Image (spheres, rainbow, N blue to C red):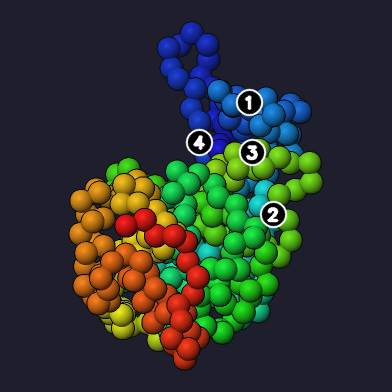
Amino acid sequence: MILEKRKASPPGDGALSMIRFGDPVMPIGFAANAEHVAFPDVPAAFELTRDEIHSFLRLITRSLHVKRHYELFRLVQDEVRNFIPHRILVSAWGDFDGAELKIDVISSIPGVRTKRPASCDIERLLRALYVRWLAHGRQPLLLQNTFGELLAESNCRCNVHEALHGMNVVLVHGRHSARDGTDSLYLTLNPGPITKIGVSVERFRFLADLIVSQLDIAFHKVAALKRQGESGTPIAQRSNGLSLREEQVIDWVAKGRTNAEISGILAISEFTVKNHVRRIMKKLGAANRTEAVAKFRRDVRDPRTRTNGKGAPFAAVRE
């Protein structure tokens, strides 16, 4: 933190030394001339170097002073990229199970902005990544080979989606608020490696957790931008009649997960999962889980298969 010293009271007069904001002062536990700084209960391999210390302190200071979107943009471009190389950063927060999901897109790529067309369906991608992050125990998640498969599920060709198709590595991480039970999700995307040379994946995840914590503070200080055509009204119900939670459930059913496993992944009761599956089969007119997956993929997830009447291949479904 950046602090400013006042003149200390004379020794022995019983008064406390005063501290105010302004001039730089190293926090307790940090030394300006130290080559590495260790955190309690953290392996030695994760110690911060002197350059990382100063970069992290700059990030903390600037995140506390963010008030406008331009300041948030500069923070991401200047400080966050020192730790997490990326070309696009996407933030999502709100109701991941319903229609009220808010999104911010930050990038120096021309045209890649929050104010994307109203027809853009990036929410579906973010909800799918959110479920994977939950299944990963809310820990930093690196995707290098499977991101393209998720993008292929959308036919959107807006500037944001076109830019996403050029990204090969994705870091997915977020913060959970124990106070109100909400989550915020952050995606950093890069066409090349997102971990620096010589930095292990484990150490990178440790650093990513530190950086996203500060990034979350900065994002909460700025009001959300509206997308093009957004009027504040809820998004129309999906044509297949399934709720967003039901789509999440059928996704995991298609991956061969049991009700008990889905319950753990989505943090809901097994009884609730069972009810979701029953409603899904009723809405899709399916006699069993396997038929429900086939109909969902054929008629909803992959419009290209509608012409030949064949569903996309899927994992063995456990009834």
Q: CA distance from mark 1 to mark 4?
A: 34 Å
Q: Which residue is mark 1?
A: 43
Marks 2 and 4, the one that precedes in the sequence = 4
Q: Residue at x 53, y 68 (%)?
A: 150
Q: Which residue is mark 3?
A: 202
Q: CA distance from mark 2 to mark 1?
A: 22 Å
56 or 265, which is in the foreground? 265
Q: Position of residue 66 (x, y in %)?
A: 51, 57
Q: Amino acid at mark 3?
A: Glu
Q: Which residue is mark 4?
A: 20
Q: Amino acid at mark 1?
A: Pro
Q: Secondary structure at mark 1?
A: loop
Q: Which residue is mark 2?
A: 194
Of badges 4 and 3, the one in the foreground is: 3
Q: Residue at x 43, y 17 (%)?
A: 15
Q: Amino acid at mark 2?
A: Ile
Q: Position of residue 92 (x, y in %)?
A: 44, 63
Is 293 placed left or right of 69 in the picture?
A: left
